[in-house]
Amino acid sequence: MERFEEIKLGACSHWSNAPYKEEVEKGYVSGTALARKIALRAFASGAEWADAHPKNPWISVKDELPPFEKYVLLWNKNINEVQTQYFEKGYDIRTFCDWYHLSYWRLADFPQ
């Protein structure tokens, strides 16, 4: 599931279980107050949801290849091995990843 779809699903779930849904349906809250209440609660719920469902930093080589001229970590899921690599411009990254059976990559966050 893509990140956008995850967030959308979380938002729909939030509304279905929202404590103020009943207030809206019964007409207890004015339009402006309701909009403010929804915005504040939705923001807080969204932040909580994002903390509980962090984005996986590993990117599948099937979805996207690593960039040129940046240090990356490459993970071979089959043998659970991680290696560091730096690809010069023009290098055939697809063949390299296929040859070494690399599954995922992420930018290497080395200290400067």
Image (cartoon, rainbow, N blue to C red):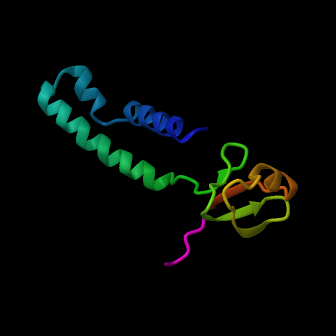
Q: Residue furthest front?
A: 90
Q: Is residue 18 above or below residue 50?
A: above
Residue at 53% over, 52% down: 55
* Residue 86 point in image, percent of width and height: 68, 66
Q: How many marks?
A: 0
Residue at 51% over, 54% down: 54
Q: Quadrant of residue 35?
A: top left
| Residue 82 horizontal side relative to residue 29, left or right | right
Residue at 67% over, 58% down: 105
Considering depth in this image, is 59 or 100 the residue closer to the camera? 100
Residue at 87% over, 55% down: 99
Considering depth in this image, is 110 or 45 the residue closer to the camera? 110
Considering depth in this image, is 5 or 66 the residue closer to the camera? 66
* Residue 63 point in image, percent of width and height: 67, 42
| Residue 30 horizontal side relative to residue 40, left or right | left
Q: Is residue 39 above or below residue 75?
A: above
| Residue 64 horizontal side relative to residue 18, left or right | right
Q: Is residue 77 above or below residue 26?
A: below
Q: Is residue 87 above or below residue 2?
A: below
Magenta residues, start to end: 107-112
Q: Main secondary structure of the magenta part?
A: loop
Q: Is residue 61 magenta?
A: no
Q: Residue furthest top?
A: 26
| Residue 52 horizontal side relative to residue 92, left or right | left
* Residue 4 point in image, percent of width and height: 50, 37
